[in-house]
Image (cartoon, rainbow, N blue to C red):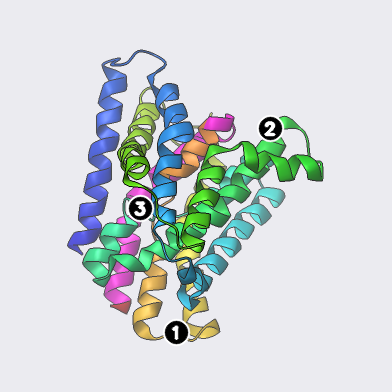
Amino acid sequence: MTGILTGFAIIATVVAAGYVCARLRIGGVGAQEALNRIAFFVAIPALLFTIISEADLGTLLSAPLLVQASAAVLAAGAFLVVSAVRLRLTASEATVGAVASGYVNANNIGLPVAAYVLGDATVVVPVILLQLLILAPITLTLLDAQTSGQVSWRFVLMQPLRNPIILASVAGALVSGFGGTVPAVVREPLVILGGAAIPMMLMAFGMSLHGSRPLHRDSSRAAAATSSVVKAVVMPVLAFVLARYAFRLDDAAVLTSVLLAGLPTAQNVYNYAARYRRGEILARDTILVTTLSSPATLLVAAALLG
């Protein structure tokens, strides 16, 4: 239980630092956008390359990961169904909401939870790889196409080649897949730059909270509420059903699947939304609500299944 609370305390502290910086106007009015852009174009690609280049891509084929992938897809689909029936969202906003419903915070909270609750931090690595190598490229390609108005196959195939996050992920996968090693003179600067990614994203998120009114009438309240419920409640339930009855995993694997599915929406979703200036309020509010509600979800899951 301590690991869950520790992970959330770490995140809250860095987010609060960003909020204070915005309130005191440290960095000026453009600080939030600058942090988001630097994170998107520099720090996140460096982080992803170093992580993926040293990862075992074979872990992507495990049964627990198939549970997570299936739960994420079903959760995103559930949001899209509700969006089509009840919500009035643009295509790009619906994309952001769907991703926010299934993209988990596997780094900041997932690693501490895996280490302190499950006793093995490596169980979260496959989820990180799934999101970085598959979900993120799909999300960014969709947002690229939706915001540019171009949907030709040539455009769809070429857009990933212009995105630093996708390029870094693919490069890391190639290094890992071919068993290559990155020279220290290249790796160490990337490690330093990558170390700034999570603090930048969290501080930018904290800055976005200053002067805003989450879940206000003028924001995407219904969409954020829907995405939050799907992420915090529906996705963990889906993971349990899939792990227990579809994949017939053992008790330990079922607990792992539910805890990973119960993680809050990742900060990356806001960074992507801010980059394309689509669904920013929806992403911000969903991250905030799921981060606040996730401790209860994880504690209940650990108590019932642990």
Q: Amino acid at mark 3?
A: Asn
Q: Amino acid at mark 1?
A: Leu
Q: Residues within 10 Å of mark 1 (few under 14, many from 20)?
A: some
Three-letter residue code for mark 2: Thr
* Nearer to the camera, 61 or 11: 61
Residue most extreme to the right: 152
SS label for mark 3: loop
Question: Magenta stretch?
Answer: 275-304
Q: Is residue 219 visible?
A: no
In primary-sequence order, the first of circles 1 and 3 is 3
Residue 9 visible within the image: yes
> Is 274 a magenta residue?
no
Residue placed under numbered mark 1 in the picture? 249
Label located before the other in sequence (2 or 3): 3
Q: Which residue is mark 2?
A: 147
Percent from the top left, x then y, of residue 46? Answer: 41, 41
Our reading of the magenta stretch's main secondary structure is helix
Q: Position of residue 111 (x, y in %)?
A: 30, 58
How many angstroms separate mark 1 from mark 2 (CA)? 41 Å
Estimate the spatial distance between the alpha carbons at disc 1 and disc 3, rounded to whole Å.
Answer: 24 Å
The residue that appears at 52% across and 83% down in the rendered structure is 247
Q: In the displayed orientation, state which residue is furthest to the left.
A: 2
Residue 194 percent location from the top left of the image: 35, 40
